Every structure is written in structure tokens, then in C-alpha cells.
């Protein structure tokens, strides 16, 4: 259980560090993740529409 807690806090600290030291790269990373989710949702919608 202790290792899980250490990994969680390490990830949080890394994200905060990344946001403060490279805000432009962090924004591009978040934008890329959001775009990927929309692309996946669109692909799933097209797949389902082709089933009927």
C-alpha cells in the first residue's frame, strides 16, 4: 500500500512541476489528449452507425 501512495504523490508532483516549468508543452499535451478522445468517440460513432 505504501508503494502505491508514493507513486501517486510522485505523479502529482511531476505534473505540477511540468505545469510550472513548461506550461506550453503541458497545454499541448492536454490538447492532444482531448483531441484523441474526440477522435476515438467519432470513430466509435461511425462504427456504430455502420452497423445499422
Image (cartoon, rainbow, N blue to C red):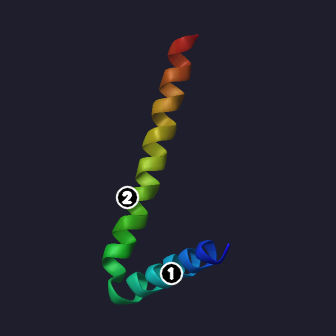
Q: Residue at x 39, y 82 (%)?
A: 18
Closer to the camera in the image, 4 or 40? 4
Residue 44, horizontal then vertical, whole percent: 51, 30
For discs 1 and 2, the disc positioned in front in the rendered view: 1
Quarter where residue 4 is shown: bottom right
Residue that protrudes farthest toward the top in the picture: 52
Residue that protrudes farthest toward the front in the picture: 2
Residue 8, horizontal then vertical, whole percent: 58, 75
Q: Residue at x 38, y 74 (%)?
A: 26
Q: Residues within 10 Å of mark 1 (few under 14, many from 20)?
A: few
Whether residue 4 is situated above or below residue 43 in the rendered picture = below
Quarter where residue 27 is shown: bottom left
Q: Residues within 10 Å of mark 2 (few under 14, many from 20)?
A: few
In the rendered image, which residue does mark 2 sit on? 32
Q: Earlier in the sequence, mark 1 or mark 2?
A: 1
Residue that protrudes farthest toward the right in the picture: 1
Is label 2 in a helix, a strand or a loop? helix
Left or right, 22 with respect to 50, comes to: left
State yes or no: discs 1 and 2 in contact (Cβ < 8 Å).
no
Closer to the camera in the image, 42 or 29? 29
Where the N terminus falls, by quadrant?
A: bottom right
In the rendered image, which residue does mark 1 sit on? 10
Could you tell me how far apart the alpha carbons at marks 1 and 2 are, in whole angstroms? 23 Å
Is label 1 in a helix, a strand or a loop? helix
Q: Residue at x 43, y 42 (%)?
A: 39
Left or right, 1 with respect to 44, comes to: right
Amino acid at each position: 500500500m505504501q508503494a502505491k501512495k508514493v507513486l501517486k504523490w510522485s505523479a502529482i508532483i511531476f505534473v505540477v512541476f511540468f505545469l510550472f516549468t513548461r506550461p506550453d508543452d503541458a497545454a499541448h499535451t492536454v490538447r492532444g489528449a482531448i483531441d484523441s478522445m474526440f477522435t476515438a468517440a467519432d470513430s466509435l460513432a461511425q462504427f456504430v452507425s455502420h452497423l445499422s
